[in-house]
Amino acid sequence: MPSRPDLRVVPDPGAPSPRVSFCGHCGQAPPTPMASRARVCALCGLGVVIGAAQDVAPVAGEPFLIVDRQLKVCGLSRSCEELLAIEEPEIVHRHVREFLEPADAEAGAADGLVQAIVESADGFGPPRSIVVRPAGEYGVRYTARVGSCGPPEGALVVLSSV
Amino acid sequence: MRTLKTSEAAAVLNVSPNTLRAWERRFGYPKPQRSPGKHRLYTHGEIAALRDALQEGLSISSAISRARESVAADTHVLVGALAAYELERADAAMEGALALRSVERSVEEVLLPSIDEIADRHGVDSAPWALAARWAGEWLLRAQRLAPPPNRHASVLLGDATGDDLSLDALALRALQLCVTRAGMRAIALPVRSLAGLSDVISAFSPRIVVIAGGEAADDTVARWAYRVRASGGAVPVLLFRRGGDRTRATGARYLASTSTQASLQLADLLDGGSRISELDEDTELDDLIPARDGRRLA
C-alpha cells in the first residue's frame, strides 16, 4: 500500500498577521486585557495604546514614530527620542522628512518612504521595509518597517539597524 | 465655570492623578489653577476637550495639541467679532471663554491676545483699535464690578503711568486691577499725575504695596508721585509693572511679571510674606526709583 503523506496545517502566507497592542511611548504591551482597552498606557501614562500587525509592531524597545497621512509626526517612542535626540512635544505635527529621509541609493523611487507612509496611513498596502537615515546625517542608516497602526489610522515607522 | 479636582479630572480621562501631574510637567497641559488651599483645580472644558482629543490622537502630544487648538478657538472668535465691529458677538465670545476658563485666564489667554491682534492688524492709532480697546476696557470694568469683596484687609495702590486709556498698557493695568481684586485684595488705581489730595487717599486706604504701571509717564512725574505716597503712607514697597526693562536694570528696582495673573500672584505672595519676586533686592528702597538730578534725589 503506497504510503500517504501526512496532512498537516501550514500557515497561510496570505493570512494577515495577528494584531497586537502597545504603548505609543514606552512600546510596552498593556499588562492586562482591561489596560489594553484603555486609551492611555497604564504603565507609563505618556502614550496612547495603539494596535498594529504583529510583524510591524515594535519589539524589545525598538524605536518608532507614528505618522499621519499628511506626513506629520504624531508620536515618538521614548527610545526614538533618545535615538534622534529630540523630544516628542517639540516635533509633534512637523513633517516626517524633517527627521527621516530615504537612504537607499539603489532603490527605485526616492519618495518610497513617503509613499509607504501614505499607503499605510490610509490603511492599505502591505508592510514595507525602507532604508532611511536621520535627515541630513550621512553614514547612519536604519531599516524602517512601515505599516498601518491605530486607531485612528496612521503609519507606524519602526527603526532597526541595517 | 465648572472646575474639577485632580481625582475628578483623572477619572474623566480614565488615567491616574499621577499621570495627570506627569502631563502637566512634560506637556504643560492641562494647566490647573490653584484653590485657596493650593490644590489643583482643572477647568472642565479643558479636560473634556482633552478627553475628546485623546480619542482622535495617535499620541498624548498630538491630543494635547488638538485640545489646545480647540480651546484657542475662542481667541479667533473674539478677534473675528472685534474685527467685524460686532460687540455683542465679542461679549458672547468672552462668555464662551469663561465657560472653559477662569476670569483671569480668560483675560490673559483670550481678551488681551485678541486685543493685541487687533493692534497688530490696524495699529494703535486706528478707529478699529479704539473701538476694540474701549470694548475691552469696559469688559474689564464690568468684571471688576462683579468681583467678590476683598477678604485680605490689604490694599494695593496702582499708580497709573500709562498715559492713554486706550493703550495696551492701560488694558494690562485694568487686567491687573481685576486680578488683584479677585485675589481678595483691595486695588485702587490713581493716575501718577494726580498729586492734590493724594495724602487723604493714602490715609483712607493705607496701601501695603504700591505698583507703578505703564511706561508713558516721565520718570520725574512718577518720582514725585511715589515720593508723596511714601511721605503719606510710610516705607511701603514700590514695584514696577510694564514700565520698561532698562529702567529695572538701571535702578535695581523691583519688577512684577508682565502678565496680570502672575503679577497678582506675586503681590499676594508678597503680602503673605513670601518672595516670589526672585529678583527683588531686599535693600531696594523707593529712592532707587527716583532718578538723581544735579547730584541729589528729587523731593
Image (cartoon, coloured by chain):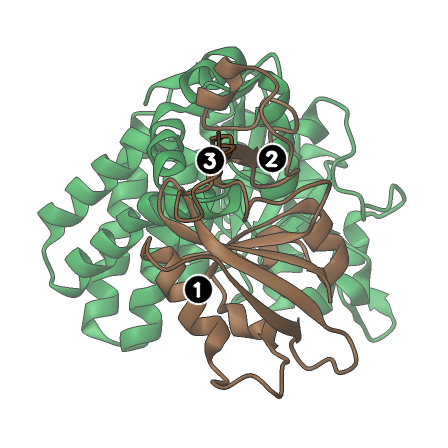
Chain colours: A brown, B green
Which disc is residue A117 wearing?
Answer: 1
Picture residue at 50% right of the left edge, 34% below the top:
A5
Residue B257 placement (x, y as % from top left): 63, 49
Q: Is residue B99 above or below residue B72?
A: above
| Residue B268 shows in the view | yes
**Secondary structure beneath label 3:** loop
From the image, tell me which residue sits under label 3. A18
Task: Sort mark 1 into few (<14), some (14-19) or many (20+) by Cα contacts within 10 Å.
Answer: many
The N terminus of chain B: image quadrant: top left
B140 and A24: which is toward the camera? A24
Give amino acid for label 2. Answer: Leu
Amino acid on which disc 1 is placed: Ile
Q: Amino acid at mark 3?
A: Pro
Residue B4 lies left or right of residue B20; in this view the side is left
The quadrant holding residue A71 is bottom left
Give the CA separation, mark 2 to mark 1: 24 Å
Q: Which residue is mark 2?
A: A46
Q: Residue at x 62, y 88 (%)?
A: A105
In terms of depth relative to the viewer, which is nearer, B139 or B159?
B139
Is B264 above or below relative to A139?
Answer: above
